[in-house]
Amino acid sequence: MATSPILRPSPGTLRRRPAGAKQTSLTLFPPAARHGNCESPSGASAPPPVPDRRTKPATELVGIARLAASSPRAEAKRGTEYFLLPVKSILNECHSERVPFRWTVNPYRGCEYGCRYCYARYTHGYMELEASDFESKIYVKKDAGPLAERDLGHEKIWGEHIAIGSATDPYQPAEREFGATRAILEKMAEREGLSVSITTKSDQVVRDIDLLQRISARSSLTVNLSITTLRTHRARLLEPRAPRPDLRLAAVRRLREAGISAGVFAMPIVPWLTDREEDLDALALGAKDANAEWLGARVLYLMPDSRNTFMAFLQAKFPRLVARYREWYGRNADAPENYRKEMAARIEILRRKYALGSRPETPAARSWHSPQMQLALNKGEQECRT
């Protein structure tokens, strides 16, 4: 008989952080991050005028596109606009064969980090926005806490793994202002028997160590810090507004010291930019020194919207690589199979060298049985035997 993860009452909802609130995160968001942005990361100002690039009039939009068009603008900082997006659910059912889980949570649509290779840029197309808007128009999901509380009570998610941050980063700068991720974690901390993972490029995750410890004590929890390279300049080019790699490793160390299961994702491995043996070795060693439990890895995957953005970046910064990428990714989203096998073998050697696991375990959610329900079951069994 299926039993719901136990609910422990506690307040929690989506709220905008008050101005001047104490910041406990170590995250640094450098200013020279995206094209045309030379402002201080802490300075608030209206973004430069941007023409409306929706392909249809608002009256002709449907679904998420219509909701996005009617979403009020809540804030403008660092050349980025934030909108409050009404949604029906926080949990999303995932049917992709490329991922080993069924349920995902992305508190935000769009991501300010502006990673040149980000595969999720295509999701802005559902809102009739350009892929280039992905990092400058961020949609905050309204009522994240109450919606999470309701969704977590559905029987269909019991025993299923929930991946937070599968498409956009749950700890991007918007989290400082709106707290949608923390509101969701507060609701998860009220329950037992969940199976949850968090993937992020931000050391801001350490802000929520208190909640992560509470979740980990009652449910299965893993945290993945995504790091492509330890070379700071190269990381800044590839991931313009993401925290420095050393800050991410420091976050892994803090999480492990707090008793939280955490590891490193070398995702993606970017051909000819982050795949040198010495660079991958340095990353694996850094993971080991941070007491990471695993080193996951995957080669760059380029969908059409991502490919257009990435190729423009290569043309500007690494023009000598353009022809190679056109040959490999011109007609395919994946790199050639022999290269992927070579990288997989290289990473496996590093795992053995530094005693790192291959990936976080995602065990079935812990079962929780009410004492009253267990008593009733035992009584029924006795009645059947007599």
Image (cartoon, helix red, strand yellow):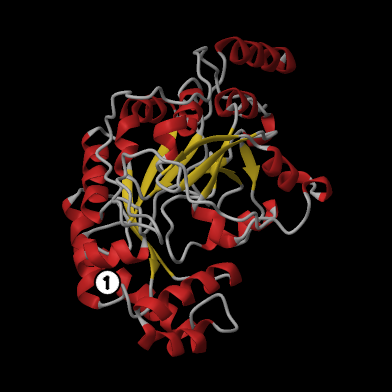
Q: Residue furthest left?
A: 289
Q: Residue furthest front?
A: 49
Q: Nearer the viewer, residue 16 or 351?
A: 16
| Camera sees residue 133 | yes
> Please, is residue 55 above or below residue 383 in the view?
below
> Please, is residue 220 above or below residue 20 in the view?
below
* Residue 363 relative to residue 21: left or right: right
x%, y% of residue 285?
A: 18, 61
* Residue 170 relative to residue 207: left or right: right
| Camera sees residue 341 | no
Residue 222, picture quadrant: top left
x%, y% of residue 214?
A: 38, 24
* Residue 102 relative to residue 352: left or right: right
Residue at left offset 50%, top offset 24%: 15
Q: Amino acid at mark 1?
A: Ile
Residue at left offset 64%, top offset 29%: 151
**In the rendered view of the protein, which quadrant contains the C terminus?**
top right
> How many numbered markers are drawn?
1
Q: Nearer the viewer, residue 351 or 244?
A: 244
Structural crowding at the residue carrying mark 1, measured as other residues with C-alpha within 10 Å and reported as few (<14), some (14–19) or many (≥20): few
Q: Residue furthest right?
A: 60
x%, y% of residue 202?
A: 34, 46
Residue at left offset 43%, top offset 85%: 322
Residue at left offset 70%, top offset 33%: 88
Q: Nearer the viewer, residue 202 or 29?
A: 29
Which residue is denoted by mark 1 in the rendering? Answer: 349
Q: Secondary structure at mark 1?
A: helix
